[in-house]
Image: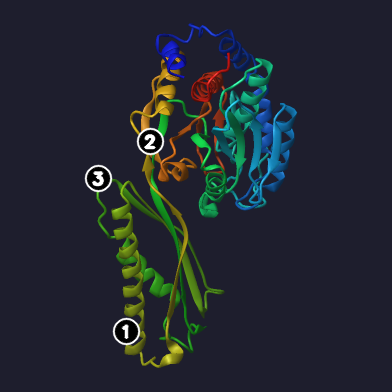
Amino acid sequence: MTSFIQNFSQKASASDTPADPRIARVLEILRGSAKATTEEQIRITEIPAPPFQENVRGAYMKKVLAATGLRVETDDVGNVIGEWPGVSPDIVMLTAHLDTVFPPGTDVHVKQEGGRLLAPGISDNGTGLAALVALSKAFREAKIKTTKTILFVADVGEEGEGNLRGMRSLVETYRKRLKYVIALDGAATEYVTTAALASRRVEITITGPGGHSWTDFGAPNPIHALGRGIGRFVTARVPESPRTSFNVGEIEGGTSVNSIPSSAHMKVDLRSESETELGTLETLLRDAIKAGIDEEMSAARDRGMSGSANLLNLKINVLGVRPAGEIAENSPLLAALLAADNQMGNRSRRERSSTDANIPLSVGIPAISLGAGGRSGGAHTPEEWYDPAGRELGLQRVALTVLAVAGLEP
């Protein structure tokens, strides 16, 4: 692998080609298949894949990956796993997540405006899934034989409350053989995710007696208590370094405007570059909500509402925990990516983010997350768009990185 990487690093521009004709052939195939890859991306995007409902899209990915010559299976959690056998049992895993953030019923029909494709999920992660198919096809057509086994995986549960369940299962299953993980997520080629951003998703529920807004006025109100707690929490000062953030993303409660609700709940996203700061932030959240409940109960007592029947109850549920981690500076995977960038004339910065790479990084397995080429915007919104112009750069960059760490057989 060292000579393979050195061969790349000697190249200065995208017009140069690697000495091995099989690699040159892979790059040529990917360059020529960009239009077909975009057409595949549209087909994939138009198959809905809401959180925890990735099975229909997964069935399609199983079919198209099998058509490229891979031996494909679906595991117990829904991951679609295609095997490119190598001489060694060691594994390089190339993944792209199946799920989107959008709920059932979302219109995922792809529209075209000029050179752009518009649809929820068109880039995140239609781009990555289409790349899996394109790369497997290119490797087969170029008659690639690798030292390590490559797993092409369309995995579940990357978004939101999926809590990276697909990647957790994959790492648990293959950990003893797993040497490198490359997650394809979105389009961008101007950066590479080399560090995992720690996060926690917390659901908070407050319940109470409820009642009529007029006749039971003064009874403790779960929404009021939640609001008091939010008001306290959002004034919390978080450090700029290590960077830390929070977001109240969902609030629900009540049945009508003239009813005191019997319950209210919210979901909060907490993130930090530091596990310690993340723990501190979660403690601040819990304390703020408890203080909000105390304030609301005090107000109820002032209005003459007291007794156990009027108590507010609190339930806190941690929906997801994403661990931190970072690839070693001397990792062969990072060297392979940098050499591929050099070969393609691409400049990319390193970033920290929350992706499927979190799980392998947290247990010491080298992992990165890459965009699969093109340009995009509006991720996680109904206005998401993707421009496939130049997508071959991303595909070729991924191919060079994968083959460098998988190793070519003579």
Q: Which mark is residue 327?
A: 2
- To which residue does mark 3 refer? 241
Helix, strand or loop at mark 3: loop
Which residue is rendered at x = 31% and y = 69% of the image? 287
Regarding residue 345, the answer to whether it shows in the image is no
Q: Which mark is residue 74?
A: none
Marks 2 and 3, Cα distance to the nearest angstrom? 20 Å
Marks 1 and 2, Cα distance to the nearest angstrom? 50 Å
For label 1, the crowd category at 10 Å Cα-Cα, with few meaning under 14, some 14 to 19 and many 20 or more, is: some
Helix, strand or loop at mark 2: loop
Which residue is rendered at x = 75% and y = 29% of the image? 67
Disc with the residue nearer the chain's start (3 vs 1): 3
Residue 98 x/y as whole percent = 61, 42
- Residue 170 vs residue 106: left or right? left
Q: Which mark is residue 298?
A: 1
Disc with the residue nearer the chain's start (1 vs 2): 1
Judged by depth in the image, the label closer to the viewer, 1 or 2, is 2
Q: Quadrant of the C terminus?
A: top right
